[in-house]
Image (tube, rainbow, N blue to C red):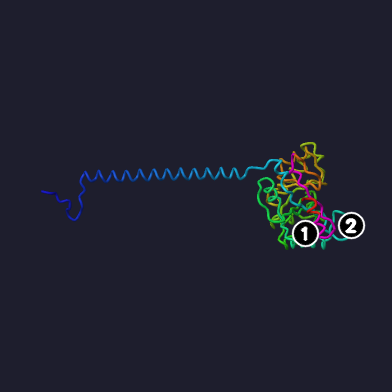
Amino acid sequence: MKKNNKKDGRLRVSGHNKFIISSIILCSFLVLSCNSGNQKQSNSKSQTNAVVKDSVALEKNSTEQILAKPQVPVICFHRIANGRNDEYTVSPATFTSQIKTLSDSGFHSILPDQLYDYLVYNKTLPDKPFVITFDDSRVEHAEIAAPILEQYGFRGAFFIMTITYNKKNYMKTEQIAQLAQAGHTIGMHSWDHTMITKYKEPADWEKQVIEPRKKLESITGTNVSYWAHPYGIFNHESVMGLSQYFKLSFSLSTKRDSLMPLQTVRRIIATEGSPQGLIRSMRKSFD
């Protein structure tokens, strides 16, 4: 007589059936575990490949490659004031006209971070790129220049001579902080404008670079990674020293150091002249 596997509406499972069901469950678990392991291995490989790709993308250019890249025009302003007649001063009207014409002519201002990435990592730049810089911490840089730049969507790099904090005709620390908050770059121009070629002892570097840089960073809340050479003067030994502290350093029209081009980026001084004259000077000096 055949056994009835149903009793009281419930299904009875024989020992043989229990064995089959257990085997199926075990096999399913093993398959899932293998798939999970393969997925983890695949994810690990993907992450490794991503790291490798990033590493390749971040490979730095050699000195020769940096020197071979087209130079980006860099303009340097000092005083912006009326009633003076020297090569370091432009009137507010001239400054406004020059900035407006650069904007109308399709130029795009870039900041030192972008210039560094272009030189070192071949990052792309906008059409007609140029850099606007200001030396000496003059108060008109914050009160006149910055608002005009911002009106035309430009940003600049302001190099601070830190002995001038809160002194007459120079920027207050609050103004320096506000420039940083507005998206401008704050850089170093030494403590008291002493030429870098005169830094002979560790104490000189401490006084002119290390301590002022810490103070400036505390004011801006940002890293200070850029330097402008006082008087535009440098030598190979001095720029070797600067490379420990700054990503880029800016000179004036002096020829770049063939071994340290990042620490001797060229600039031209903007003078009291027509906007078209400034554009011609940019093309002549950097083409």
Q: In the shown orientation, is residue 221 left or right of residue 280?
A: left
Q: Is residue 76 left or right of residue 35?
A: right
Which quadrant of the figure has residue 99? bottom right
44 or 228, which lies in front? 44
Mark 1 to mark 2 CA distance (whole Å): 19 Å
Q: Secondary structure at mark 1?
A: helix
Please tell me how crowded label 1 is: few (under 14), some (14-19), or many (20+) other residues with Cα within 10 Å.
many
Q: Outermost residue toward the left?
A: 1
Amino acid under disc 2: Asn
Q: Which mark is residue 48?
A: none
Q: Which residue is mark 1?
A: 145
What residue sits right under mark 2 in the picture? 85
Q: Position of residue 127 (x, y in %)?
A: 70, 56
Q: Secondary structure at mark 2?
A: loop
Query: Which of the pair 156/213 is nearer the observer?
Result: 156
Residue in the picture at 78% in, 47% down: 266
Count of numbered badges drawn on the protein: 2
Residue 270 is situated, as x and y percent measured from the top left of the image, at: 82, 55
Picture quadrant where residue 174 is located = bottom right
What x and y, as percent, mark residue 48? 52, 42
Q: Position of residue 207 (x, y in %)?
A: 77, 42
Residue 183 occupies which quadrant of the picture?
bottom right
Q: Nearer the viewer, residue 69 or 123?
A: 69
Point out the stretch of residues depicted in magenta. 259-280
Going by the numbered disc 1, the residue's amino acid type is Ala
Question: Does 122 sit above or below residue 147?
Answer: above
Asked whether 29 or 140 is in front, the reply is 29
Outermost residue on the top side: it is: 201
Q: In the image, what residue occupies the spot 20% across and 54% down?
A: 10
Residue 46 magenta: no
Of the image marks 1 and 2, the number of the one nearer the N terminus: 2
